[in-house]
Image (spheres, rainbow, N blue to C red):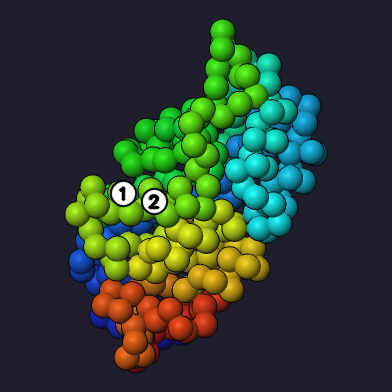
Amino acid sequence: MSNAIPGEPGTRTGLRSALLAGPRRLVVTDVDSTFITAEVIELLAARAGSQDEVAHITERAMHGELDFAASLHERVATLAGLPVSVFDDVLAELRLSPGAGELVAALAEAGWPLALVSGGFHEVVDRLAGSLGITLTRANRLEVVEGRLTGRVQGPVVDRAGKAAALREFAAIEGIDLAHTLAIGDGANDLDMLAAAGIGIAFHAKPAVRASADLAWDGPLDEVLDLVATTLHDVSAPEARPGSVARSARPTTATEPPSPRR
C-alpha cells in the first residue's frame, strides 16, 4: 500500500474525493443481501412457517436456475394470511450491510442520487428508504385484503428487465447519462441492471453475476466508490467509454481497493 498522506491526489481517499467531486452520477443498488444483510421475503416466510421452502427457492432464483417472476409468485403464495403488522416486525429486524450507511452519507454529501431497486416489496423498501432520506425506489407490491396478505403480487413483477428499466427511468429523471450510472447487485435478477449501467458492480455476488459484471467487490458497500475511483484512474483501454470501464475487460474482483498507481 502507498504511504502517501490520506486525501492526497493519487491516494485511495484522494481518488474517492476526486470521483465524488467529478461528474454527478446515479447509484442504483439492489436491496436484499446487498443494501441490507437479509432477504425480506425469508423474514416474512419465517412468520408464515415457510422459511425453509422459501429460502431454497430464493437461492435457486438468485443463481439464475429459476424464472424470477414465477419463483416470486410461488414464494409470495406461502405468505397468505399474514397480517400487515408483520411489516413492522420485519423492519425492526433489518440490518444495513456494512458500509451502507456510509455510502448513503457520502453520496448525499456529493449530491449524487441513490436509488433502491428491489425484487422485494415496497411495503418494506419505501419505509427503509424514507428513514435514510432516499426518494427513488422501485419494488413489488403485495396485495392486502382486510388487513392480511392474500399471497398475491399486485402489478408487474420487478424482474431483471424491470430493474434495468428502473435504472434508465431514474437516470432520465435525474438528467444523468447512462454512462454516469453505477449499479450494484448480487443475484441473477440484477444482471440486466448491471449491464445497462455505465459500471455494473457485483457485490458479494453469485458466480454468474461476478462473471458478467464490470467489477466485483466483497468488502463494505461504501468502498465500491474506492474501487470505481481506482479503476477509472487506471483505465487505459481505448475502447473504454467516457465515465465507464471497458466491457471487454475481465471483472476486477477484490476484497479491498487495489492500490492506485503512483
Give, as a three-letter code, the residue at label 2: Ala
Looking at the picture, does residue 258 appear above or below residue 75? below
Please tell me how crowded label 1 is: few (under 14), some (14-19), or many (20+) other residues with Cα within 10 Å: few
Name the residue tied to disc 1: 169
In the rendered structure, are the residues bearing label 2 and label 1 in contact, judged by CB atoms less than 8 Å apart? yes
Looking at the picture, does residue 156 appear above or below residue 208? above
Name the residue tied to disc 2: 165
Q: Position of residue 52 (x, y in %)?
A: 80, 39
Q: Position of residue 225 (x, y in %)?
A: 38, 66
User: Residue at point 69% right, 35% down?
Assistant: 75
Q: Quadrant of residue 200?
A: bottom left
Q: How far apart are the two marked residues, 2 and 1, measured between alpha carbons?
A: 6 Å
- Quarter containing the C terminus: bottom left
Q: Position of residue 179 (x, y in %)?
A: 29, 68
User: Residue at point 46% right, 63% down?
Assistant: 194
SS state under label 1: helix
210 relative position to 13: left or right: right
